[in-house]
Amino acid sequence: MATASEAPAAPSAGPGEPRHGLRIFLIWLPLALIADLLIVFVWGPHLPPGAMSTSARSQQVDFIVLGAMAAPVMLFVLTYFGYALIVWRHREGDDTDGPPIHGNTRIAATWIVTSSVIVLALAVYGTIELWLPAGAGAGEGNTPIWRPSGGAALQVQVIGQQWRWTYRYPQFGGFETTALVLPVGENIQFNVTSLDVIHSFWAYQLAVKADANPGINNVAYTKPLHTGAVQVRCAELCGLWHADMTTSGVVVSVAVFRAWASATETQLAALTRNLPPYALTYDANQIPQLGKAFTAPPPAGAGLSGAGGGYYGGQYPVQP
Amino acid sequence: MAIEIQPEKAQHPGGRGPGGEARRRPWWMRPAFHTGIVGGVIGYLVGHWLGNFLASGYSQVQNSGQNDLAIVLGYVVGTVGWLAGLGVFNDLLRQMAGKPVPVLEEEHAAAAGMARYFRYSLDHKVVGIQYLVGMIAYFLTGGLLAMAIRTELLSPSYHVFSSATYTAIVGEHGTMMMMMMSSVVLGPLGNYLVPLMIGSKRMAFPRLEALSFWLTPAAYLVLLSGLLWGGYPFGWTGYAPLSVQATQGADSYAVAFGLMGLSLILLGFNLVVTIICYRAPGMRWSRVPIFVWANLTTGLIMVLAGPVLVGGMYMMITDRTVQTAFFTDDLGGSSYLYQNLFWFFGHPEVYILALPGFGIVSEILPVFCRKPLFGYRVAAAGMIGVTLLSFFVWQHHLFVSGINPDMRPLFMLTTELISVPTGFIYLVAMGTFWKAKIRFTVPMLFALGMYFNFLIGGITGVFVSDAPADTTEHGSFFVMAHFHYTIMGGLIFAFMAGLYYWLPKMMGIRLNQTLGKIHFWTMFIFFNSTFLPLFAVGLAGQPRRVYTYARNLETLNDWVSISSFLLGVSILIFLFNFVMSTVFWRVREVSNPWQSRGLEWQVPSPPPAGNFARVPVVLSAPYDYGDPGAQPVADLDPPAGVLSAAYAGAGVEE
């Protein structure tokens, strides 16, 4: 890759010239080691999106791996730049030019091979991380190829519309609620769809994100590992009140969830009959009937409030 | 190499007609900016009337009494009127009528004064300056909108703007920056410098060149007029069901983006043809300056990606006006179609915004390191590699959208692969630094700032390209911070480097260096202080384009907002320096202040009309610093026989 006028290879310095390459390496090595240790052991366990679900945990590991790969590369460039700017700066009164080095095939080839190996490794790693935790919580479209193992998942349909989220539980008669309540330790299958424009269902603590497209069923999987509150936001600009399209969800124990779901199913039976029958997608003409779901009372002690508790009234939310 | 071999007579684009009488009209009768405005207003009224005549019976924007066809036709015919008023079609019509096309004496008579900058000028140096002033104006507009955004985000709950105003501002800022800034380097610096750097007297298509510029004010005004309609609520991406439903502001978005797409196609096409066909003898591909390589590759992306954008905008317009259903799922269309079309343009667009920056910093580095560019071929190959790969990565914007999810590993791979050729600019920089004599001039400081910022932008790009991690990052402030690091931190810093470096060439005057250093340090510090915290804000769960956010993120957001205001102050310092230096102080600069070997620096500053008295013969590569045996870069007054010999494909070897 070097030009024809090959200059002396960079590391072979003249007499009296310090070995710049070795120096840069020796400055870089401890910095890189310290940075990687900090990222893996100190910073890593606190990195978002936490460890509340399988997908969150896998993404946290992913961030750690990417960070541990990126930090040495970044530090190498910065160390080199810092060294160069200090050591090879222009001295007052020196009007000569630098040595005419046009290139160095060995160094260029090393750089290209190293960077290619790093990115190929990252691509392979990323694919595995996508595969093993069943799609890593991302929307997989209508026919997901990466599914969780271990029996049928709890289905939760997420319906986005301007500007609220509603949830239907088809395994409990298809009742509809504005409260996202999930059992801990069970595989969850989110079927995300929209009634009007494109939204994006983002359950932050669960590290689930799936676009809600009108007329399309977008499936995402996760498995909650701990109980606790979940913030749901919209991650795709969907119009005026995009920022307010939030609900709180909650992960509760399996027993609490079953009790809540059965009670709600019974309580809402009359309303559910008036809803369009459960389907993976809905016709836009049915929009008026949907989205008027009764706000089911949250399970006792779950601490559900705010947007999940009927925050929006009427057709449009009032400005908070 | 196809070049003009008769250097004696300067090329007048269009040629002087045999009976080309010089007709002198009073200034207000000559086509210029003001006649353009008159034409634009008349055109808008005619188009608006026509649209109402055609469509007011069947298509109305809800609750407004307007119809979209009238607005769109108003914009389109208004743009045609604006161009007609500027005189864009005059020569064309004369030729169609079989009349000789005169190069009016008045054009050259006026060529000395300021008036030429307000006219449809065919001189690439005039167009370059026009682009420069235009781009700075567009950039400042976008920057003001950005500070309005940050003002709103000072508080998670208290509101300066209504959500409607805020969303409109976000959309205008994004569109202004992404579409108008896509020619921020190729427009001013490319048009001005490429002919000088390759030893040509002009661009290949001067009329297209002028047209590509004069489309930008039209696009700018059409885009801003969206605010008068109440803006549009869909950001710069314009995802389909929302944009098809939106009110009148969406028409201004689609027309403006389409016009700018047209301008990009013309600009890129012109540059590509010029670089391929108008190189001086001896300007072999191995001697083409790296900035010209950046222009060539960026121009190629513009030519190939631009039509997809124009097509997408055209579909959106027909969806909105004559009720085609390209993007309506119910009627056989698909909202995914728009996303694919948009990002098939939109991702190459990102490299339209990155490659020119690579070109500028790689061009500047050897001059201030006083060393040859390390790995010239690697640098050029990297740009070509980025160009090719940029068309195969667009679906990484759709990782969570549900489109063909099994293809995510493929797009993850292509996206991560593109970091290999992108990384070449760092290899080239680090190789050039080796045992260099680095001079910390203002352009060099900005170039170094670009390398620092783009390093962060590039490394976080790997985070975003990783599909599992992208699940959390997608649509959050993390992505927003990432691309501001690559575009603002990369492109705009490189643009500033290029400006401080080449303005002495373009205007013959020097920007104040002390103010330049203050500008650099404030911009560098406050840029990083603005955007670095936004990575954390994004990972903490703040989605993009929200006017209200979680309370626990208020401290970080306030920090960012205040930094962004200070960043605005640093841009004001630049503006002050630019205006004072170019208009009032006007300190003359020697013709080659940086002792550069670039061909553009071998002619006086500013270059005379026609750039070179005779077509130069290029003798050596532009970066042979420190080589005592290096030939001068070019023979500016070659002996008579050399040019015809070169044209025959012989001679002029070293």
Image (tube, rainbow, N blue to C red):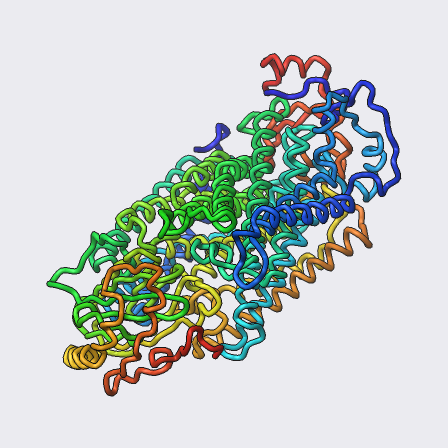
Q: Position of residue B126 (x, y in %)?
A: 73, 39
Q: Position of residue B28 (x, y in %)?
A: 85, 43
Evaluate whether residue B350 shows in this view: no
Quadrant housing residue B645: top right
Quadrant housing residue B275: top right
Evaluate whether residue B619 shows in this view: yes
Q: Residue at x 37, y 63 (%)?
A: A35
Question: In the drawing, does residue A53 fall left or right of residue B302?
Answer: left
Camera-nearest residue between B405 and B128? B405
Camera-nearest residue between B416 and B30? B30
Quadrant housing residue A37: bottom left
Q: Residue at x 72, y 49 (%)?
A: B41
Camera-nearest residue between B21 and B479? B21
Look at the image and tell me in which quarter the C terminus of chain B lies. Answer: top right
Question: In the drawing, does residue B603 fall left or right of residue B535?
Answer: right
Look at the image and tell me in which quarter the N terminus of chain B lies. Answer: top right
Q: Position of residue B606 (x, y in %)?
A: 76, 39
Q: Residue at x 17, y 72 (%)?
A: A172
Residue B627, compared with residue B260, is above or below; it is above
Say how many tags the image has.
0
Question: In the drawing, does residue B167 fall left or right of residue A254?
Answer: right
Residue B390, compared with residue B581, is above or below; it is above
Residue B553, compared with residue B210, is above or below; it is below
Question: In the drawing, does residue A134 fall left or right of residue B316?
Answer: left
Q: Position of residue B46 (x, y in %)?
A: 68, 46
- The residue at the far left in this view is A151
